[in-house]
Amino acid sequence: MMRPVFTAAFVLMASNASAQEQPVTTNSVLNASPMEEVVVGFGASTLGANIETAYRINPNYRVRGILMGGIDADFEETDEDGDFSGNVTLGGVAIMGDFYPLQSGWRVSGGLLFSNTELSGTGTADVEGVATSVDADVAAQFSGDITPMLTTGYDLGLGGGWSLNTEAGVIFTGGIDVTFTAEDPALQAELDNDPELQEIVEDASEIPVYPYASVTVSFRF
């Protein structure tokens, strides 16, 4: 008489154990499954037009490449230091790592910018103590060709795989190198010793960051 009772109890216990273990197994499979996806985006930034591509490794981490550029503008500058005209080029390539701490649309990103940003021009510089203006070339660029970037952003899902992405942060330039050069060594010495021109060089070298902001529309495959 006791055997059927023990048999029924064993079956009931085994059934309960199976029911308790099943959700754990299912959850572990879901957690182990990577959230792999490829994203391609187009937009604009403070360094020009943007083309982005990203690969999401899991819900928390993503790697991203950005090609920036397209701004190639002429300029003319006239002030008490002289008259200059030339060209400004903005752009570069960035490799970023995106971290989603809340597994939501908000992210914190860091990476490296391979800069192609530069200014070059020619004109005349008014040098203190020299009666006539000095013909000179001027050039400016980030101190480092490879500079760190730190940003934060948000990805707003629009449905159907589309999203609107905003991002803001800074590029750690390490300063901006500005140089004034003349062909004549004697005139070069005058440029190097002119207090107003050297103040421009010094002030630019103390600019630690360049602001970065972008708006991108992306599609997730």
Image (cartoon, rainbow, N blue to C red):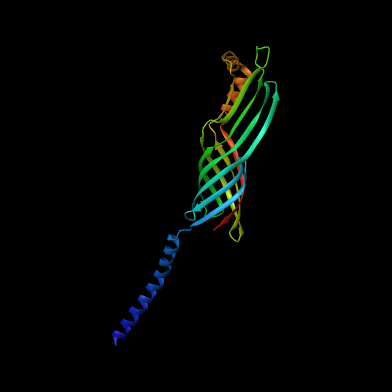
Image location (x, y in percent) of residue 198: 60, 20
Q: Which image quarter: residue 141?
A: top right
Residue at 37%, 78% (x, y): give it. 12
Is 134 above or below relative to 205? Answer: above
Name the one closer to the observer, 62 or 180: 180
Is 42 above or below relative to 22? Answer: above
Seen as rendered, the residue at the extreme front is 183
Image quarter where the N terminus lies is bottom left
Image location (x, y in percent) of residue 117: 58, 35
Q: Is residue 16 left or right of residue 68?
A: left
Is 199 above or below relative to 208? Answer: above
Image quarter where the C terminus lies is bottom right
Image location (x, y in percent) of residue 40: 56, 53
Q: Is residue 119 left or right of residue 94?
A: right
Residue at 60%, 15% (x, y): give it. 187
Q: Which image quarter: residue 184?
A: top right
Residue at 63%, 33% (x, y): give it. 88
Name the one closer to the observer, 1 or 123: 123
Q: Is residue 166 left or right of residue 28?
A: right
Q: Which image quarter: residue 129?
A: top right
